[in-house]
Amino acid sequence: MKATLLWALFLGLACASCASAPTRAVTTTPSGAAAPEGTPATVAAARSVPTTAAPTVTSGPVTAPPVTAPPVTAHVPTPAMRADASPGRAAEAPAAPRVPVQTRARGGAADLARSRRDVMTSPLQTPLQALAAANGAARQRPSRDGFVAARHDYFYEPGALFELYANPNYVSTVLLEPGETLHDIAAGDTSRWMVSEATTESDGEGRAVVLVKPKAAGLRTNIVLITDRRTYLIEAISQPGEAYAAQIAWRYPPRAQTAAQAVSIESLNFGYRVRTVRGATPHWSPTRVFDDGRRTWIEFSPTILATDMPPLFVITGEGRELVNYRVHGTRYMVDRVFDVAELRIGVRKPVVVRIERRATSAAPGAPGAKGARRTSRATLQ
């Protein structure tokens, strides 16, 4: 009985020592050599070995406690180890190749560059782009062959932009056509640019001059000149240094003759009487009045350019009427023929100069010749 118990205890201790020992799976390859641990063959063999529990030995009334062997854990290599690496050294596995994913790009760099290219090449432009392109095409700059001494002559074109390079240390001048009357001046930046008007004599005829001077360098503005003949669009640019535009002027395309030049002298009627009816004779009293049967011209002395020019009123059966006329230098041009008219300056004590058309000197076929005779007689009475 004692021998049986001792034998059972011996077997239990032996099984326990076997279970606590480390397990190493060894497999052989088809060639008969043992495969190293960690290889695919070893892993497959370890996975294929079934795990069984140790048998329970009983003898008589004494039953030994069941002994269960620990599960066998197979060594599986991680993705960071290669199959051909040594057991004690881990090597990085090659990264998986990236597969390009085709997506629909929207708003990326390629689309932005493509849209910019389309905008530059597309005939459809935004309003600002259209303005910039139009201004660039209309801009005229100084050229070497456009200078006469220090004056640069532009070729005038309606709607063109003419550049004027100014300097804070110098005054630039803008010279208009002889006999051209300047009506208005407008500048974009009047606080940092000085723009004023002056008059010079050219062959006995007044010639308007515009003086331009910036207060600092690095400025840019535009200047608009409105005359009785045309409109000038100037872009003034202030530059540092010593260079500046001393004077700019224009060459003009041949224009049609004026109405006074187109008619012959024989068809003009100079039969007008000019007299002062109130106050002393002013210096602005007309020197000559004539008409061609459709228009009337009133000429003054050159000194009138230095003073205010009087407004013109036409006397009709309903009273005194202010009429429209155009100023050409020292001359009024009225788009009608009148019998009696007045030039007036002043309110409380006005100075009045009356212009009367003589019927006997009317041009042949001139409208209102008979009426002029009757009006003149009534006025003389």
Image (spheres, rainbow, N blue to C red):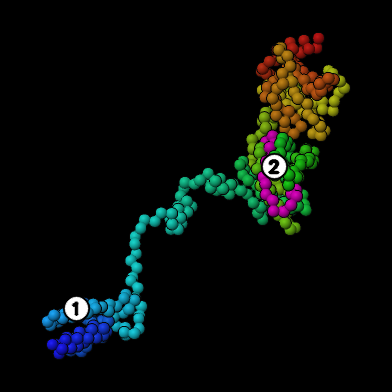
Q: Quadrant of the N terminus?
A: bottom left
Q: Is residue 285 above or below residue 213?
A: above
Helix, strand or loop for the magenta stretch, by majority: strand
Q: Is residue 215 above or below residue 262?
A: below
Q: How many marks?
A: 2
Q: Which residue is mark 2?
A: 187
In this rendering, position of residue 54 left or right of residue 324: left
| Labels 1, 2: front one | 1
**Magenta stretch?**
212-229
Q: Is residue 225 magenta?
A: yes
Residue that appears at 23% across and 77% down: 71
Quick check: can you spot residue 220? Answer: yes
The amino acid type, in three-letter code, at marker 1 is Pro
In what element is the residue under mark 1? Answer: loop
Relative depth, front residue between 366 and 242: 242
Gap between marks 1 and 2, in whole Å?
112 Å
Q: Is residue 53 magenta?
A: no
Residue that appears at 67% across and 41% down: 224
Q: Is residue 75 above or below residue 244?
A: below
Residue that appears at 64% across and 51% down: 141
Q: Which residue is mark 1?
A: 66
Whole-percent x and y of residue 250?
Answer: 68, 45
Number of residues whose C-alpha sits closer than 10 Å to that of mark 2, classed few (under 14), some (14–19) or many (20 or more): some
In what element is the residue under mark 2? Answer: strand
The amino acid type, in three-letter code, at marker 2 is Ala
Q: Quadrant of the C terminus?
A: top right
Relative depth, front residue between 184 and 54: 54
- In the displayed orientation, state which residue is furthest to the right: 280
Quadrant assignment, res 310: top right
Residue that appears at 61% across and 41% down: 158
Quick check: can you spot residue 147? Answer: no
